[in-house]
Image (cartoon, rainbow, N blue to C red):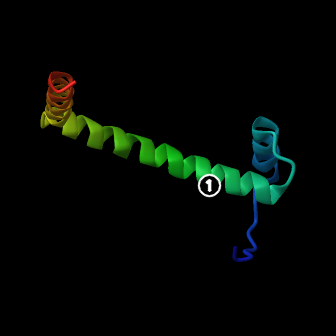
Amino acid sequence: MAPTQIDLAEEALAEAMRIMGTTTKKETVNAALRDYVDRVKRPEAAKKLAERGARGEFEQAAAHAAMKRACRAAFE
């Protein structure tokens, strides 16, 4: 990690530490950054899943799995 010197809003930092249960400024800022990135990624991932569903990919995968199970059962 690279050391970075920044001015922080002390009241906001103290509130974030209280809410997150963190004990250091570094831990709080890093946790907040990770949380922000996760929140941004979630809608993108949901959108991609919805697009795959609209294309019928999940139905195709389910049909393929069912066919494999039927083939295995036929040879048992």
Q: Quadrant of residue 48?
A: top left
Q: Is residue 42 left or right of residue 11?
A: left
Q: In the image, what residue type sits under mark 1?
A: Leu
Q: Residue at x 76, y 36 (%)?
A: 19
Give the percent coordinates (x, y) of residue 63. 14, 28
Number of marks drawn: 1
- The reply, left or right, for residue 9 in relation to residue 53 is right
SS category of the residue bearing label 1: helix
Q: Residue furthest front?
A: 76
The front one of 16 and 57 is 57
Left or right placement of residue 5 versus residue 68 in this view: right
User: Residue at coordinates 20% horizontally, 28% vertically from top-left?
Assistant: 72
Mark 1 nearby-residue class (10 Å; few <14, some 14–19, many ≥20): few
Locate the N terminus and report the quarter of the image it occupies: bottom right
Q: Position of residue 28 (x, y in %)?
A: 75, 51
Q: Position of residue 30 (x, y in %)?
A: 69, 57
The residue drawn where x is 46% and y is 47% is 40
Judge whether 43 appears above or below 13 on screen: above
Above or below residue 12? Residue 33 is below
Note whether 43 is above or below 6 in the view shown.
above
